[in-house]
Image (cartoon, rainbow, N blue to C red):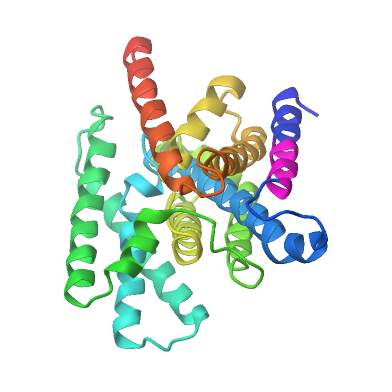
Amino acid sequence: MPRPLFLALGGLGLLALASLCIGAASLDGRAGLLLSVSRLPRTAAAILTGAALAVAGVVMQQIVRNRFVEPATAGTPEAAAAGLLAITLVAPAAPIWAKMIVAALSALVGAVLFAALIRRLPPREIYLVPLSGLILSGVLGAGVTFVGWETDLLPYVSVWLMSGEFSGVIAGRYELLWVAGVAVALAWAAADRFAILGLGPEAATALGLNPRAVLRLGLAVVALVTAMVVVTVGMFPFVGLIVPNLVTRVMGDNLRAALPVVALAGAGLVLACDLLGRILIYPYEIPAGTILGVIGALAFLWLLWRGDRDGR
């Protein structure tokens, strides 16, 4: 087993054990019920969320050939929230699977819009790509917020886009995230195709690959992961940006070998932020997304600074 994979797996195991033991309620006398209803689902939700978002970040970076993008900086969560808001207004009693489908389709539209937008940018201006994604996110988010305000649905919008926390996760309310886990497995199965697509459409075609088919597959993975996370626990920023960049610096550009480490590291990062949220003001909680936003913003600035120093 490669050393980075071993370390990532061991670290995630320790974090998972700590997650099962830490909480406001004591395990004495009702350990089985508390673990099965709350602690295990919460730990699994954090692991699935982190792994899925990290891998989705890798896929998006390969699609657009830019290491400073991820779903949360490309307008995809806001697009998914727009779909959820629309179906909530039109059919508030719709089952969860219907909301999931609408969110996934609207997230796909947002990802396609972002991909179409960056095609018009100068190829050498790499920082314009994340900047364009942030602008698109701001425009879509402002529209969703305005409609939510006008229709008294702003609390729902806040849960989808701003909270990013696991305090409400119990058995029966997180299982949609396993669909995101399936998307991660699909991305790993197609890792070689995404790696070739990252060389550019001309090189991919010369190597016998259909770039459009792989692009559609990648966008579908990103949209599905984003929709499942937004529907279930709200969006978490920066996971798909900082984790792939840090893992790549250690393991290089072998995508198939790096993806399992990316998934484990993303899971560990989100779970660690959730643990910090439980500990810092115990017995109260800080949303994991808040802690991750602070850590991710600092890491993003560091990556930008290192990129300038390295000439990339």
Q: Is residue 55 above or below residue 112?
A: above
Q: Would residue 138 be found to the left or right of residue 182 on screen?
A: left
Was residue 114 drawn as part of the magenta stretch in this picture?
Answer: no
Task: Look at the image and tell me in which quarter the N terminus lies.
Answer: top right
* Residue 50 appears left or right of 67: right
The magenta segment = 12-21
Q: Which residue is drawn at 62% across and 55% down?
A: 186
What's the residue at 18%, 63% (across, down)?
143
Q: Residue 300: which quarter of the image?
A: top left
Percent across and percent down for residue 235 are 42, 54
Q: Give the camera-side residue of 29 and 244.
A: 29
Helix, strand or loop: magenta stretch: helix
Residue 228, x across and y down, in percent = 50, 63
Does the magenta portion include 13? Answer: yes
Q: Furthest residue to the top?
A: 309
Horizontal and vertical percent position of residue 259:
62, 39
Above or below — where is 148 with respect to 264? below
Residue 277: % across, % down:
52, 43
Looking at the picture, tell me which residue is in the foreground, 187 or 262.
262
Q: Which of 137 and 64 is in front in this view?
A: 137
Residue 109 shows up from this direction: no
Q: Specify the quadrant of the image occupied by residue 226.
A: bottom left
